[in-house]
Amino acid sequence: MARLVIVSNRVALPGERTQRAGGLAVALADALVPGSLWFGWSGQRAEATARTANILSANGITYATIDLGEADYRRYYAGFANGALWPLLHFRLGLMRFRAEEYEGYRSVNRAFAAALAPLLGPDDLIWVHDYQLLSLPAELRAQGVNNRIGFFLHIPFTPPVITEVLPRAAELLAGLAAADVVGFQTVRDRDAFAACAEALLEARRLDTDTLALGEHRLRAVAVPIGIDATGFTQEAARAARRVEARRLTESLQGRALVIGVDRLDDSKGLPQRFAAFARLLERHPVHRRKVSLLQVAARSREDVERYQALRRELDRLAGDTNGQYAEFDWAPLRYITRPLSRRTLAGFFRLARVGLVTPLRDGMNLVAKEYVAAQNPADPGVLVLSRFAGAACELSEALLVNPFDTDEQTEAIHAALEMDIEERRARHHALRERVFTNTAALWCQRFLAALAARPAVRIECRARPV
Ligand code: ADQ
């Protein structure tokens, strides 16, 4: 069997779990079998970007990492990836900041990844590249003479041509990605947006639903939604709900209903809008005063990106306003935590929560929505309020779907969730649970790797357009 080589911005080294890389490690658990190689950034910043990888083996898996030079890191990660691409691909043109030198830094880190990875590859390895930090990597690997099959999965949304073309050098960037054999997206909507961009910006021809022709090159673009380890998460939640953290939370609630939100502190997650909707709930529906608490866990992320510091200040203010206006000496309506909590603790909290709020302005998938569903007790489940603009909404249509920009709609959905009778809660949860248990992380891996392996055995020799 071919060896699988995973490439991502961050590698979750054994014993070290960053939030993002840790999430990927969980999703890839079924694919990362002994014999696999995981390549990426070590998380260390050095004076200059390393040319060769550090190799470490554990449990039969090889981890190969490179350190990034401080200047490269800034231009690539805080600069182009999170200053330009992230807002663009989340439809936030107003937040996008394009700087040519950051784009060049991004390209040069992608080139450095390719140069350090190429010598580690065998001829039959299947390469699976992850996410928006590495859009140019397929072309950079081809430039290193790598003819292996290359798959790429984008975890975040993709934008239609009218938005994508606003990014300077968009065609060049897309051509880099199009040098892969298979590109995977979270939803049909993202896959179609990509195909439309390839047609508009690269003069690709769409041969059928998931095949594009770029000259002689055939590129498959597939929609493969990511999932979770539903069985594992359900068991974890049931156990965690009996642990000390969950017991302390229950005690502190004193019989009040818990509404929960769990996100990275990120401007795609719709947190100011969520806080506003919750404040309006208390204003419009006084019946919930003293009866409900919102626990928002918003783990700090990307703190070296300026926007994130401003968001944090805004949330501090909004939380203070709501508590200042409605809190009583023995009740705080909004509990807001910016420290990360462990997966286990969160699983238990999800199970206790009568309502789960997952209201991003735009999200590739949003695994919190699926985790919340998996964590519920089927006999007495909570209600998921979900943004229509999360990829998860394509599958989880029995949630209460909202437009997060519409404060009133979000407020009324939280109200309806809190008032919903047990029969309706069970019926909705039954349908959602079915979906979460069908489209699991394991199935996601299988489906993507099947698409990658299904490419014709002899890849048509080609180079993407010069980049
Ligand atoms: P993220 O934007 O990081 O990922 P998401 O899918 O919501 O988002 O969460 C990933 C994991 O992080 C989940 O397991 C979740 O429980 C955990 N997590 C989130 N907030 C946390 C917190 N405050 N404390 C501790 N853990 C927390 C990107 C895309 C998503 C896509 C994923 C996977 O933006 O749309 O679902 O990749 O493809």
Image (cartoon, rainbow, N blue to C red):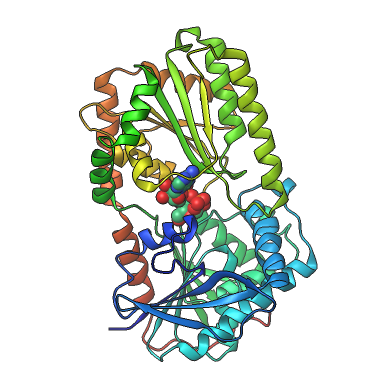
Q: Is residue 190 left or right of residue 259?
A: right
The percent position of residue 369, horizontal first and vertical second, equals 40, 41
Instruction: Please state which of residues 167 and 358 is positioned toward the viewer in this rendering.
Output: 358
Residue name at image x 61 percent, y 62 percent: 197
State whether residue 449 is above or below residue 396: below
The percent position of residue 31, horizontal first and vertical second, equals 32, 69
Q: Is residue 391 visible in the rendered structure shown here?
A: no
Q: Residue furthest right?
A: 100
Residue name at image x 60 percent, y 20 percent: 322
- Quadrant in the picture for residue 453: bottom left
Q: Is residue 331 left or right of residue 452?
A: right
Instruction: Please state which of residues 311 and 381 is positioned toward the viewer in this rendering.
Output: 311
Residue name at image x 63 percent, y 74 percent: 68
Q: Is residue 97 left or right of residue 363?
A: right
Instruction: Please state which of residues 239 and 143 is positioned toward the viewer in this rendering.
Output: 239
Count of residue discs: 0
Residue name at image x 56 percent, y 78 percent: 66
Q: Residue furthest left?
A: 379
Q: Is residue 1 visible in the rendered structure shown here?
A: yes
- Quadrant in the picture for residue 52: bottom right
- Quadrant in the picture for residue 29: bottom left
The percent position of residue 382, horizontal first and vertical second, equals 33, 28
Instruction: Please state which of residues 361 and 345 is positioned toward the viewer in this rendering.
Output: 345
The percent position of residue 40, horizontal first and vertical second, equals 51, 73
Q: Quadrant of the C terminus?
A: bottom right
State whether residue 370 is above or below residue 32: above
Q: Quadrant of the N terminus?
A: bottom left
